C-alpha cells in the first residue's frame, strides 16, 4: 500500500498502522539509527507525515530545513 501524503491530515486505519509500524511496535535506536534505518524507518516516517499532513509538517520544520527542502525540490525537477 503506497501512502501519498496530502496537504491536509489523513486518517490512519488499522491496516495502514499494521503495514507501516514495526512488527513488534517497539521503537529502537541502534547505532544512531531510528528503527535500524532503512525501510522500516522510512515506512513509519511516511505514515506519520501522511497522518499529520504536509501543511502541519512544513509548519513544524525550522526555517533552515525549509530552505534545504526547497533546494532539494528544485534540484529534483
Image: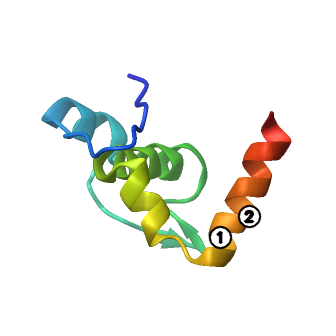
Q: If the image is split into quadrants, where does the N terminus sit?
A: top left
Residue 55's place in the image compared with 4, above or below, is below
Residue visible at 50% across and 53% down? 41
Please tell me how crowded label 2 is: few (under 14), some (14-19), or many (20+) other residues with Cα within 10 Å.
few
Residue receiving disc 1: 65
Residue receiving disc 2: 68
Q: Which type of secondary structure does the marked residue at label 1 adopt?
A: helix
Q: Quadrant of residue 65?
A: bottom right
Horizontal side of 46 relative to 64 (left or right) equals: left
Camera-side residue of 42 and 4 = 4
Camera-side residue of 7 and 42 = 7
Residue 16's place in the image compared with 35, above or below, is above
Residue visible at 73% across and 45% down? 73
Most distant residue in the left direction: 14
Q: Position of residue 7 (x, y in %)?
A: 39, 43
Please tell me how crowded label 1 is: few (under 14), some (14-19), or many (20+) other residues with Cα within 10 Å.
few
Q: Position of residue 38 (x, y in %)?
A: 60, 49
Camera-side residue of 63 and 43 = 63
Q: Quadrant of residue 63?
A: bottom right
Mark 2 and mark 1 residues within 8 Å of each other at the beta carbon: yes
Q: Position of residue 25 (x, y in %)?
A: 26, 55
Camera-side residue of 16 and 23 = 16
Amino acid at each position: 500500500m503506497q501512502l501519498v501524503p496530502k496537504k491536509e491530515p489523513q486518517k490512519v486505519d488499522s491496516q495502514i498502522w499494521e503495514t507501516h509500524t514495526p512488527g513488534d511496535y517497539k521503537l529502537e535506536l541502534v547505532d544512531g539509527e531510528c528503527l535500524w534505518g532503512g525501510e522500516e524507518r522510512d515506512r513509519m516516517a511516511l505514515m506519520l507525515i501522511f497522518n499529520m499532513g504536509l501543511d502541519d509538517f512544513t509548519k513544524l520544520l525550522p526555517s533552515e530545513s525549509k530552505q534545504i527542502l526547497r533546494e532539494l525540490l528544485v534540484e529534483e525537477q
